[in-house]
Image: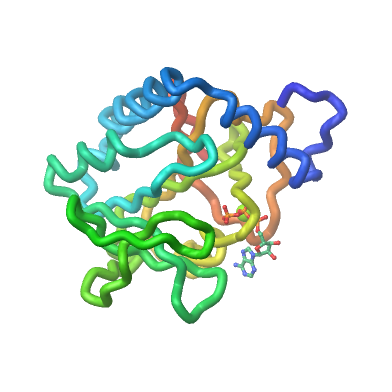
Amino acid sequence: MSAPSMHPSDKSQLRRHFRSLRNSLSQTQQIAASEQILAQCHALTQYRDANFVACYLAQDGEITLTPIIEDAWQNGKTVCLPVLHPFCKGHLIFVKYRHNSEMILNRFAIPEPKLNVADIVPISLLNIVFTPLVAFDESAQRLGMGGGFYDRTLAPMIRNEISPQVFGVAHDCQRVEEGLVNEEWDIPMQKIITPSSIFNAS
Ligand SMILES: Nc1ncnc2c1ncn2[C@@H]1O[C@H](COP(=O)(O)OP(=O)(O)OP(=O)(O)O)[C@@H](O)[C@H]1O
Ligand SMILES: [Mg+2]
């Protein structure tokens, strides 16, 4: 975080600042970042051993996971994407994503696989959930877009020993040096993966 006047508890100001930073990255920087994230994942046994990985489709300057999605498909992993829960407001479900999945735009204009009950994957089956984020700190705290979707959806899994590994994915410029305020509802990330580094939960 570069602006010294910014207070870590002012989440809306932090979100504006870091969304604007990531949106100012060039196409070349974005492509390089996405390839570096795949290289980081290849070095992680959790990724190499994973059978079910939940990814996201990048919006708003987020790092695209396209290289990971392609790699996962090639290696026989099942790729899932988050879909807004049709009844349970503020929650996500994870749905299988294939080359030929029929996609629809949700109410945030984010593409998601058309909901087919047979394609829903229970969270307990997911090995890794890659989450987008707006800002992070070196102890792997995450600030998201503010909807609380991942927090709500993954909260019941936190005490569960078979819960997925939750890895935040971010550009290096999204790091808050002063640290983020941890809200009681924020679900912990096991790692934040950036193109240059991996930050582990403290
Ligand atoms: N487990 C939960 N139960 C009830 N409300 C929750 C829960 N988790 C988050 N919320 C609500 O969601 C709101 C947004 O949460 P927060 O600011 O942590 O979003 P975020 O983590 O940045 O967003 P996202 O997870 O969608 O990227 C909070 O103000 C809180 O009221
Ligand atoms: Mg949160």
Quarter of the view holding residue 17 = top right
- Tell me: 90 left or right of 65: right
Of the four image quadrants, the one with ligand 2 is bottom right
**Quadrant holding the C terminus:** top right
* Residue 38 vertical position relative to residue 157 in the rendered view, above or below: above
For the question of whether residue 185 can be seen, the reply is yes
Number of numbered discs: 0
| Residue shown at 18% from the left, 49% from the top | 77
User: Which image quarter is the N terminus in?
Assistant: top right
Direction bottom: furthest residue: 87
In the image, residue 83 lies at what x, y percent? 40, 64
Q: Is residue 134 left or right of residue 113?
A: right
Residue shown at 46% from the left, 28% from the top: 194
Estimate the x, y position of residue 94 in percent, counting from the top left: 35, 63
Q: Position of residue 147 (x, y in %)?
A: 62, 59
* Residue at the image position 36 percent from the left and 62 percent from the top: 104
Identify which residue is drawn at 35% across, 65% down: 123
Q: Is residue 154 above or below residue 15?
A: below
Whether residue 202 appears in this view of the structure is: no
